[in-house]
Amino acid sequence: MLQTGLALVLLIAGLACIALPVASLLMRSLFDAHGLWVGLDNFRLWLQTPNLIDATWRSLRVAAVSAALTVLLAYGYAYALTMTRMPAQPLFRALALVPLLAPSLLMAISLVYLFGNQGLLKSWVGGPIYGERGIVLGSVLWTFPHALLLLTTTLAMLDARLIDAARTLGATPWRIFTTVVLPASRYGLLMAFVVVFVLVITDFGVPKVIGGQDGVLATELYKQVVGQQNFALGAVVSVMLLLPALGAYWVERHLRARQSAALGARSVAYRAQPAPLRDRLFLAYCSLVGLALLGMIAVAVFASLATYWPYDLRPSFKHYDFDNMDGGGWVSYGNSLRMALAVAIWGSAAAFLTAWTVEKAQSARLLREGVNLLATVPLAVPGLALGLGYVLFFNAPGNPLGGIYGSLTILVLSTVAHYFSVPHLTLLSALRQLDREFDAVAASMGVPFWRTLWRVHGPVCIPALIEVAGYFFVNSMTTVSAVVFLYAPATQLASVAMLNMDDAGDIASAAAMAVLIFATAAAVRAMFWLLHRGAVAYTQRWRAPNTAATRAAAPADIPAPSAQS
């Protein structure tokens, strides 16, 4: 009964926080500004609006080009990390993941300082970089680590027996690459392309800062809602953003299943052999990419400290005086810290409960399937679309939940919902590592499920919970799209303040806020890493049978189990 009640509560929460806002968005696209049913007339208006049609094609074009470039660059980097003996591989892996800690606006702001109207290097690219090429370059920089994570996983699963067989048959390294490595990683390449395509087409920060007059769907949605208060047409643009995201979500799930099926039970991990020339070439390539990524961060830091770019480059902290700038002052930074902490705590708890209900609960199968479905829906919903859905649902007349509109609570709910799917799947995987015999034995002994949850399931998942909390915190600090429609003057966030300062022309202060967000995310991520190491050492000792205690407890005539067993 308690498990059924928990599943029902989680299902209702998922409906209120995910399904109903998305449904409100879809329904609003079928009504006019006065609330009258117009069917598909709003979509016909969209087709008759040249700016929106141009933005749609530009979004698709920019996303496709950005995805192709990102995957190409990330594949070479991933190959160097997994298929060569290049020195300092852990260092280069860490360098490539640094952009995950920064808002996407930081990359765009750095590009403005380098190649904008007052850019030091604008002559290198034939003039200011505003427009499509700026969006593409900024998108490649901030999505690079997302593609890299997918591709390193793909190449790490390559079966070494295939390469050994090709070498035995006398194949050259290039032929091995084209006939073995590349075909084996095709699903990973397609998945990376799809993921980056969705990230770029739904991104708001980069095109807002460096897009210039070249609008995309995300910026047009912002203009319709904030600039013109046209929620009907804004809902239509949101649906247009939702469609490619849904299609890409379906393709990604299909490809992931195919890739999983390609990994056999007898696969052998590949260990690269030294090849000095190859390793030096890849070292040079990874050094260039790593310097480019770190260079963007360094440019933002330097610009935030320069007195008056590019004429007076003496260091100064005046751009960190946020209380005298447009954007909400230091209060917005405090709001972001409070929201990120709340999202990390409540989001992690909710993700664990949904994962446990789906995997370990013994009753209410249909309710559990509904909870699992709702928990994975946010993967296919862009942040801007979800944010507008929250406006339409929670601000609707007669909604008993409308009291939270404009408060920090709705920002926490929207952020948890936006990033919920990845933590849910992560904890689901952690719980699936436990054999169901634990639950069967506990049930046969009459142990209540809540005691098994507290004594077994919870401790096993502590490392994963720490990772999930860090994921929630960092994304809460850097998010813009999920909250840009929902904040009030008293609840403005640092990421939104950065956007507003850029709009007001205070780009140096925007860079300073971006650097502050990055530094905070990096510090907190390091703290979570230390917590994770301690949690693994304390809670996962049962996974290592070859311990001193085990050896001491083993009878003299029976050898203690080894790490190989």
Image: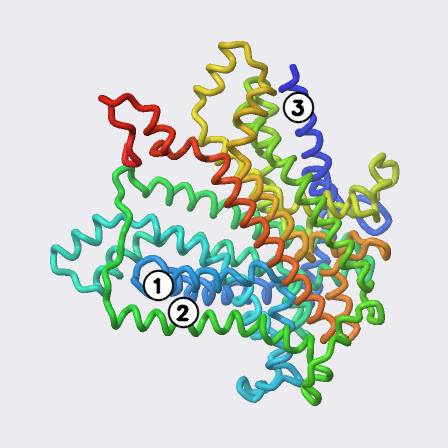
Check disc 2 and give the amino acid type. Answer: Cys
Q: Which residue is mark 3?
A: 6
Q: Which residue is mark 2?
A: 286
| Real-space CA distance between mark 2 and mark 3, rounded to the nearest whole angstrom | 49 Å
Q: Which residue is mark 1?
A: 80
Check disc 3 and give the amino acid type. Answer: Leu
Res 149 quadrant in image: bottom left
Q: Quadrant of the C terminus?
A: top left
Q: Position of residue 23 (x, y in %)?
A: 71, 40
The answer to whether marks 2 and 1 mark residues whose Cβ atoms lie closer than 8 Å is yes
Q: Is residue 123 left or right of residue 384?
A: left
Q: Nearer the viewer, residue 339 or 139?
A: 339
Point 55% across, 55% down: residue: 198
| Real-space CA distance between mark 2 and mark 1, rounded to the nearest whole angstrom | 8 Å
| Real-space CA distance between mark 3 and mark 1, rounded to the nearest whole angstrom | 47 Å
Check disc 1 and give the amino acid type. Answer: Ala
Res 148 quadrant in image: bottom left
Q: Nearer the viewer, residue 157 or 55?
A: 157
Q: Nearer the viewer, residue 270 or 378?
A: 270
> What colouring method underlies this structural image?
rainbow
Up/down of 474 relative to 506, above or below:
above
